[in-house]
Image (cartoon, rainbow, N blue to C red):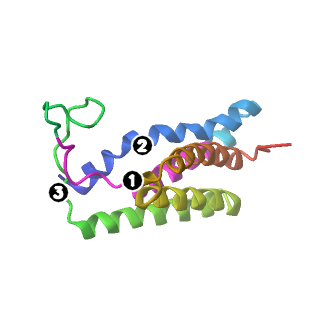
Amino acid sequence: MTLAAALLRTARQWIKNGAVLAAPAAAGVLDTGATAGRLACAFGCLSAVASGTYPPPTTPPTPTATGATRSSGCVPSPPVDLPPRVAVLAGTGLMAAGLLTAWLTIGAAFLATVAGYVVLTVAYTLWLKRVPVVELAAVAAAYILRAAAGGVAADVPLSR
């Protein structure tokens, strides 16, 4: 499988980044062209860093004793044949591209929000997902950061 195909397998993570629309939608500012462009950029930045922090699996889910897969009943996809170094380089490159784009296109406040998201998701991938209750808080915080990123990108006050 090619690197591009491996990255496209992480596209299921991208739908979560639709949360960037929450704050601007609540503020009623989705109808301006400038805001739409900034939100599209925000979505792209979050999708890039999400693809970097959620690397594609290198093996399909393991079948259980009954033959069912451990994933939510989905048919396992073929393994991704990426050497570990290529996967790490691709992930690091995507995170760097997302962070740089966040800074250059939207600004420092958006960069800080996306950087916080990166730190949280890397910590989740490496450690937090193994800690009960903390895992739940980390997943919730990731959604909050996505929504906050949309507010920052659209220049919408998140609280008064």
Secondary-structure class at tag 3: loop
Say if the magenta span includes residue 107: no
Q: Earlier in the sequence, mark 2 or mark 3?
A: 2
Q: Earlier in the sequence, mark 1 or mark 3?
A: 1
Residue 88, label in figure = none
Q: Which residue is mark 3?
A: 81
Q: Is residue 39 left or right of residue 81?
A: right
Neighbour class for label 3 at 10 Å: few (<14), some, many (≥20)?
A: some
Secondary-structure class at tag 1: loop
Q: Position of residue 10 (x, y in %)?
A: 35, 46
Kindly tell me whether residue 127 is visible in this rendering.
yes
Q: Write the residue at 16% across / 44% down.
A: 78
Q: Which residue is mark 2?
A: 13
- What amino acid is found at the position of numbered circle 3 in the picture? Asp
Q: Quadrant of residue 113?
A: bottom right
Report if the CB atoms under discs 1 and 3 are less than 8 Å apart: no
Neighbour class for label 2 at 10 Å: few (<14), some, many (≥20)?
A: some
Q: Which residue is mark 1?
A: 54
- What amino acid is found at the position of numbered circle 2 in the picture? Gln
Q: Earlier in the sequence, mark 2 or mark 1?
A: 2
Q: Compute the Cα span from label 1 to label 3.
A: 16 Å
Tell me the quadrant of the picture where the C terminus can be found. Answer: top right
- What amino acid is found at the position of numbered circle 1 in the picture? Tyr
- Give the prevailing secondary structure in the magenta stretch: helix
| Residues rendered magenta in the picture | 37-62
* Of the pair 145 and 66, the residue shown nearer to us: 66
Report if the CB atoms under discs 2 and 1 are less than 8 Å apart: yes
Q: Write the residue at 25% across / 49% down.
A: 5
Secondary-structure class at tag 2: helix
* Of the pair 36 and 83, the residue shown nearer to us: 83
Kindly tell me whether residue 32 is visible in this rendering.
no
